Image: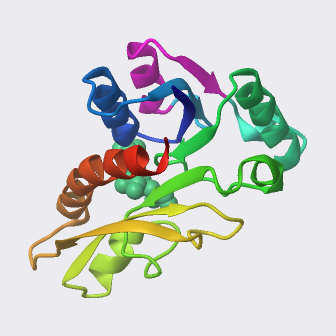
Amino acid sequence: MVKIAIFASGSGTNFDNIMRRVAAGQLTNIEVTALYTDQPTAPCVQLGQQHGLTVHTLSPKSYVDKAAYEQDVLSRLQAEQVEWIVLAGYMRLIGNTLLDVYEGKILNIHPSLLPKYKGIDAVGQALNNGENETGSTVHYVDAGMDTGQIIAQRTCPIYKDDTKATLEDRIKALEYELYPEVIQQIIR
Ligand code: GAR
């Protein structure tokens, strides 16, 4: 079993999907040790509890700086003997404290066809730019914002009558297939 930790900041539907795949035996040889969140009131917290997982709700503002926050995260990861970190809607840059130990073993999923539309509101950026297709990318995490080596991408159309909500739903449907596939392929 390879031990992984999942990091999320929001609704946590990708996290939930990964947990369901593991429970259904569709994602094998992986043990999720815990959910880590920087948003103690986010819906992902409740999802984590429903899955019976340890949920680390750590508020970065309550630490003196980012390094101190990440040091606490790192101590917990090491206590759980976590080998890989899977970011699933974790809306914070990973800093040197975690990268020094885990670089090359951190995956992220981002809702655009990187290198296009890095950063926040990638879905809105693609929509507002008049694109007729977009998608999602899984990549390794480095010190930049959505700049790490790309592992896999999947595309979907953008229709004329799309709103951000309809497009987000279409992208998330792709992500629920893409992320488990890449996790299974990369994390062994
Ligand atoms: C996902 O679409 C993911 O690609 C995106 O946040 C959403 C999280 O949804 N990630 C980023 O924008 C990272 N830059 P979820 O909380 O429902 O899984």
**Nearer to me, 50 or 86:** 86
Q: Is residue 51 magenta?
A: yes
Residue at 58% over, 36% down: 39
Left or right, 114 with respect to 87, comes to left
Q: Residue at x 74, y 40 (%)?
A: 60
Image colouring = rainbow
**Image quadrant where residue 47 sits:** top left
Give the number of marks: 0
Membership of 46 in magenta stretch: yes
Q: Residue furthest bottom?
A: 130
The magenta stretch is: 42-57
14 lies above or below 179: above
Can you give x and y, in whole percent of width and height, for residue 88 in the image?
46, 46
Above or below residue 45? Residue 166 is below
Point out the residue furthest to the right here.
Answer: 64
Q: Is residue 10 above or below residue 56?
A: below
